[in-house]
Amino acid sequence: MSFTFRRTLGSEDIAATTTCCLHFSNRIGKLGLLLLWHFAHFVVRIWYFVLAIAQTLESHLIARGVFEEYKTLNINKLHYLAIVVESEEAYKTSKVIELLKWLADIGVKHVCLYDSEGVLKKSKEIILGNSNATFWEGINDKSSLLDQKLITIEFASFSDGKEAVAKAANYLFVNHLTLRGDLMEPIFTEPNMTDALRAIGFKGPDPDLLLVYGSARCHLGFPAWRMRYTEIVHMGTLKSMKFGSLIKAIHKHTMVHQNYGK
Amino acid sequence: MEKDSNVGGKTSNTYTGYLGCLLRKCVFATLSVGPIPNHLAFIMDGNRRYAKKHNLKEGAGHNAGFSALMSLLQYCYELGVQYVTVYAFSIDNFKRRPEEVESLMDLMQEKIYKLIEEVSIVDRYGIRICFIGNLKLLKDSVREAAERAMKATAKNSKSVLSVCVAYTSTDEITHAVQESCREKVDAIEQADSYNKEEGNNLLINLVDIEKKMYMVAAPNPDIIIRTSGETRLSNFLLWQSACSHLYSPSALWPELGFWHLVWAVLNFQRDHWYFEKIKKQI
């Protein structure tokens, strides 16, 4: 009887020990993966640190005119530039003004300043007052923008994107009811949408280039209707903006060739 | 001896395959410690340049691109990505030479049937296939193939593959606006007493438009990857990408592989805190 009792105890011990070992090795495995994950991200951080140093050095050299290729910019290829700023950084008005001065020096004629929360819109008077710029009144034709003598600035926010489309939808809907008279099914085309957006005041042309000043490459809700073929370039944060990097981004854009789907 | 070396060759390939699979599992297990993107979108750019680079026949680049797509889909679903969207054919691509468009349509039709008729990745990962876009612009045989694929995989629920074909964002937005207006017109028709002034007060809200978007069934993409180093979205998911991480590797689409995906996910994890912050703002 005592022998049987001893055997039963042994089986339970083995099962408990096995469970314990599995549990322990599982925890070791998870700890191992956690360490590997942190190591991978440490390597990523080192990579970006080295990249930042290289980019800073390159930017200084470009600004000092060391590289021949950046000395002349075919700025006429850039009709319309958009600047997207993260809303928290958009409060740094002095940095925005400095960026606009750089753009004016390069020869950019027209800029759309965007941040999702409309901080730049609220700072419009300060920005226009301290830059050699005028407020953009709304021009449809992109080619005519090159005739401007002063830099013109358009201010945009998230409400100029999706909400503008909702307003355009209502404009089309009311027009449909008014013109059709009876309740036929509405049929709208993309030109109808473009005309509706213009009719309700959203006249801005599509930017050729969109520079993102923020922590990551993301357009932060810039009006979708205007971004079909816009080149989107990440410039880093506004506080770390560099003149040489700006020259490089614009120069690279002037070398781009688009097929537009063909 | 030849037989032995052939068998030997096959065995070494199998071992390499197993090792590759094991390495992939280890890497994915490591990545899974951090947040994994729920929705990945790909702009499959560079097939023609790939064919030119490797002196291949026209069309071979797209075949290579399809193989790359199958591999990437496998990696994505192994990693735990639930939604994958690919930009297969834009409305703008109809402007290409008719022979090229025809050949692309034929390739698409062939691959769709291969996916649903053979035991494939679709069965292995329980993928529901959705074709997104203005399908009326496709020729009948391709549209039928797409509809068959959607019907055959409708009951799958583990993951979703959205194939954007005859698609542009501006067409999607216009279509959503049109459908929202139609809904309002129907609402007016069904009203007990029709009053034109009351009808005019029925406003279309943003929610009404978003419900009619082609991509309504999927969450917004976490990462949009465009290959070939091009930095534009070319009218792809413009409405849905306000909080998407945009990644443009210089590799051509058929060259995109496992390590590019790993790098994209590492960057997503690195900036995850930032994207969570801006999602709350926008």
Image (cartoon, coloured by chain):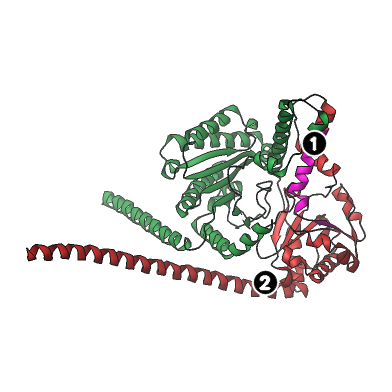
Chain colours: A red, B green
Point out the stretch of residues depicted in magenta: A152-174
**Quadrant assignment, res A8:** bottom left
A54 is within the stretch colored magenta:
no
* Chain ID, mark 2: A
Tag 1 secondary structure: loop
- Circle 1: residue type: Asn
Residue B102 at x, y percent in the picture: 60, 33
Residue A258 at x, y percent in the picture: 71, 49
Reading the image, the residue beneath label 2 is: A55
Quarter occupied by the C terminus of chain A? top right
How many neighbours does mark 2 have within 10 angstroms: few (below 14), some (14-19), or many (20 or more)? some
**Quadrant assignment, res B99:** top right
What is the CA distance from the residue labelled 2 to the residue labelled 1?
55 Å
Quarter occupied by the N terminus of chain A? bottom left
How many neighbours does mark 1 have within 10 angstroms: few (below 14), some (14-19), or many (20 or more)? few
Of tags 2 and 1, the one toward the viewer is 1
Query: Can I make out residue A248 in this image?
Result: yes
Badges 2 and 1, same chain? no
Relative to B201, say whether A41 is above or below: below
Tag 2 secondary structure: helix
* Chain ID, mark 1: B
Residue B55 at x, y percent in the picture: 56, 48
Reading the image, the residue beneath label 1 is: B201
Magenta-highlighted stretch: main secondary structure?
helix
- Circle 2: residue type: Gln
Residue at 51% x, 31% y is B148
Relative to B192, say whether B261 is above or below: below
Relative to A23, say whether B232 is above or below: above
Residue at 78% x, 34% y is A173
